[in-house]
C-alpha cells in the first residue's frame, strides 16, 4: 500500500512537471504591439532629440567577412515605450527596478474606439470601466489594462496622431486617453499591474497636469505608450509581455511589447 502510494505520488509529480513545461506557443497567436523605431518615430514635440541610428560599419572587412554595427541614440519617451514610475514620482521605481510580474501580465483590453472617434479629447471614465466589468467580469488584480482608441491607425502622422505637429510646442495636442477617475479605480481599487494605451500618453493630449501619470506613479504602476495592434486582442484572455531595455536608473525606455492570444 505504501509502495502504491509512492508510485501514485511519483506519477502525480510527473504530471505536474509536464503541465509546468507545457507552454506550447503554437496554441497562441503572437501579436506585435510595438511600432518600429526609425526616422519617422514620433516623439513628444518638446523632446530634445529623436531616434538616431549611426552606422559604424556596414560592409566587407579586411578579413573577408561582412560586418555591420550601429550606434543608437534615443530619448526614453517616444515610439512604443515604457513610463517607469520614476517618470512622475521622485520615489518611484526606475526602469530596471520594475518587477517582471508588472511587465508580463494577463491583458485586459478596454475598447474605447467608438467614443474616441466621436471625440478626440475623450477620457475613459469610471463608468466606462464599470460597464466593461459588467460585460466582461471584474478586472483581476495584477492585470495589464490596455485602452484601445484606434489611434494607431494615424501613426506616424504627427498632425492626426498627436493632434498638432508644431515643432517644440506641446500646448495644442489632442488625443484620447485614460481619465483620472478611471485611473484611480484601476490603480487604487483594482490593483492593476500596468496601464497601456495606443496613443502617445496615459494622460489625454490636452492634459496640463498629468494626473493619470501621477496616480499611476504614486502606486509604482508603469505605463506602456504608443502601442499598436490592440484590435487583435480580446477583451480578456490574452497575455502581454512588455519588456523595455533594462536602463539602470531610467525613467522609461523603448519597449518591445508582444501579446499571446489563445487560438
Ligand atoms: Zn512616456
Image (cartoon, grey):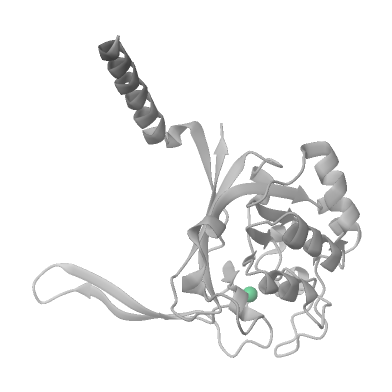
Point out the image quarter for the N terminus: top left
Comparing 144 with 34, the one in front is 144
How far across and how far down the image is residue 248, in percent? 43, 79
How far across and how far down the image is residue 116, in percent? 85, 58
How far across and how far down the image is residue 261, in percent? 57, 39
Q: Quadrant of residue 53?
A: bottom left
Comparing 249 with 61, the one in front is 249
The residue positioned farthest toward the front in the image shown: 2
Seen in the image, is 17 located left or right of residue 209?
left
Question: Taking 153 as reference, is 247 above or below it?
Answer: below
Q: Quadrant of residue 202?
A: bottom right
How far across and how far down the image is residue 252, in percent? 55, 75
The residue that appears at 59% across and 79% down in the rendered structure is 86
Seen in the image, is 35 located left or right of residue 72?
right
Residue 209 visible? The answer is: yes
The residue that appears at 81% across and 52% down in the rendered structure is 113
Comparing 89 with 128, the one in front is 89
The residue that appears at 61% across and 74% down in the rendered structure is 85
Quadrant position of ligand 1: bottom right
The residue positioned farthest toward the left in the image shown: 63
The residue that appears at 34% across and 77% down in the rendered structure is 70
Q: Count the numbered circles shown.
A: 0
Point out the image quarter for the C terminus: top right
Question: Taking 115 as reference, is 4 above or below it?
Answer: above
Residue 149 visible? The answer is: no
Seen in the image, is 69 located left or right of residue 113?
left
Amino acid at each position: 500500500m505504501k509502495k502504491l502510494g509512492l508510485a501514485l505520488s511519483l506519477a502525480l509529480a510527473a504530471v505536474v512537471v509536464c503541465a509546468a513545461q507545457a507552454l506550447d506557443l503554437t496554441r497562441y497567436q503572437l501579436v506585435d504591439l510595438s511600432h518600429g523605431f526609425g526616422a519617422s518615430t514620433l516623439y513628444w514635440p518638446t523632446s530634445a532629440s529623436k531616434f538616431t541610428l549611426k552606422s559604424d560599419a556596414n560592409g566587407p572587412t579586411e578579413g573577408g567577412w561582412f560586418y555591420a554595427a550601429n550606434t543608437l541614440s534615443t530619448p526614453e519617451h517616444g515610439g512604443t515605450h515604457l513610463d517607469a514610475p520614476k517618470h512622475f514620482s521622485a520615489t518611484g521605481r526606475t526602469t530596471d527596478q520594475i518587477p517582471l510580474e508588472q511587465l508580463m501580465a494577463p491583458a485586459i483590453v478596454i475598447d474605447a474606439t467608438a467614443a474616441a472617434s466621436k471625440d478626440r479629447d475623450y477620457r475613459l471614465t469610471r463608468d466606462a470601466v464599470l460597464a466593461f466589468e459588467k460585460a466582461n467580469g471584474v478586472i483581476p488584480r495584477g492585470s495589464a489594462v490596455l485602452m484601445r482608441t484606434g489611434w494607431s491607425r494615424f501613426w506616424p502622422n504627427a498632425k492626426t496622431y498627436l493632434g498638432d505637429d508644431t515643432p517644440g510646442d506641446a500646448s495644442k495636442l489632442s488625443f484620447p486617453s485614460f481619465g483620472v477617475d478611471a485611473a484611480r479605480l484601476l490603480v487604487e481599487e483594482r490593483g492593476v499591474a500596468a496601464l497601456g494605451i495606443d496613443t502617445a500618453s496615459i494622460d489625454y493630449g490636452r492634459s496640463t497636469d498629468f494626473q493619470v501619470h501621477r496616480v499611476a506613479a504614486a502606486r509604482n504602476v508603469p505605463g506602456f505608450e504608443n502601442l499598436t495592434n490592440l484590435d487583435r486582442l480580446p477583451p480578456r484572455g490574452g497575455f502581454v509581455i512588455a519588456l523595455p531595455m533594462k536602463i539602470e536608473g531610467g525613467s522609461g525606455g523603448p519597449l518591445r511589447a508582444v501579446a499571446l492570444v489563445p487560438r
